[in-house]
Image (cartoon, rainbow, N blue to C red):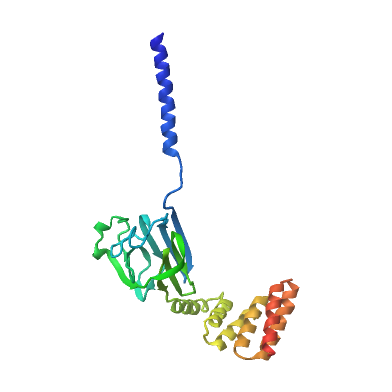
Amino acid sequence: MKTKKLKTIAAVLLITGGSIITNAQTLKVPAPSPLQTLKQAFALSDITIEYSRPGVKGRVIYGDVVPFGKIWRTGANATTKITFGEDVKVEGNAVAAGTYGIYTVPNKDSWEIMLYKDLTLAGNVAEYKKENELLRFTVKPTALGNKVETFTINVADVSPANANIELVWENTRVAFSVTADIDSKIMKNIETSLAKDSRPYFQAAGYYYDNNKDLKTALEWANKATEMNPKAYYMFMLKAKIEYKMKDNKAATATAEKVIALAKEDKNDDYVKQAEKLIAEAKK
């Protein structure tokens, strides 16, 4: 009887113990250096960055936790990765579309930044191999007025063909430029698209207007767009802007008045205000 009771107790302990172990293994807690994936639309594709974000936590970072003059993984945990969706230039250097590791050598007055082809190296920088570098360049750090607690990578100052990648932590900011040659691609796309039956006159006119290209051609396309879409007040608004940019204030005013009439029919106050503002500017 005693033997049977002991077996029962042992079985209960085994089950309970197994439950405790299982719960311990599945317990979810916040990561000390949480992972972040950042995706930014840029040029005709995207820039994607994946990295882990350590915190200052009362420490001195640069010159201590991250020593000066030594290769740093630029974050924590796995390799910090940057993916360019198309061919770009980084600090003026050609970089093919693809994914690269970001490694750095911080110094007090300058940083070396490397794009690295081996994505498995992570923090094992003792095995860093110069032959796996795609690119290495030097930038100047700037001091921040306010302390940044968590290591942060930003895609900043984004315009159609230019952006800056920022590395920000503690009291230091480091940035490098990324540019893309989209103008030649878009011009070719416009030429190809306008040769087809379904012609994107409006988009082509908008690109010429936004990028200060031949306004006479832009107006021709805007006219064709409005002829094909006689109720599209947003297309007439673009036409009015082109005419105003060409300093034909009389034509711009007449087109803007048409925008107001069409927009009121559709109860779109935003375009009414835009057209009224253009008319007021044309009268100055």
* Quarter of the figure with the C terminus: bottom right
Q: What percent of the width, then of the height, locates residue 176? A: 39, 71
Residue at x-position 56% and y-position 84%: 218
224 relative to 6 in the view: left or right = right
102 relative to 243 in the view: left or right = left
Please tell me in which quadrant of the rendered image residue 10 appears.
top left
* Foreground of the two, 78 or 86: 78
Classify 72 as above or below 190: above
Q: What percent of the width, then of the height, locates residue 129? A: 24, 62
* Foreground of the two, 117 or 54: 54
Residue at x-position 30% and y-position 60%: 118
* Foreground of the two, 229 or 142: 142
Instruction: Kindly tell me whether residue 1 is visible in this rendering.
Output: yes
Q: What percent of the width, then of the height, locates residue 139? A: 35, 72
Classify 209 as above or below 88: below
Outermost top residue: 1
Please tell me in which quadrant of the rendered image residue 3 appears.
top left
Please tell me in which quadrant of the rendered image residue 229 appears.
bottom right
Instruction: Kindly tell me whether residue 223 is visible in this rendering.
Output: no
* Quarter of the figure with the N terminus: top left
Residue at x-position 41% and y-position 53%: 33
* Foreground of the two, 203 or 198: 203
Q: What percent of the width, then of the height, locates residue 61? A: 37, 60
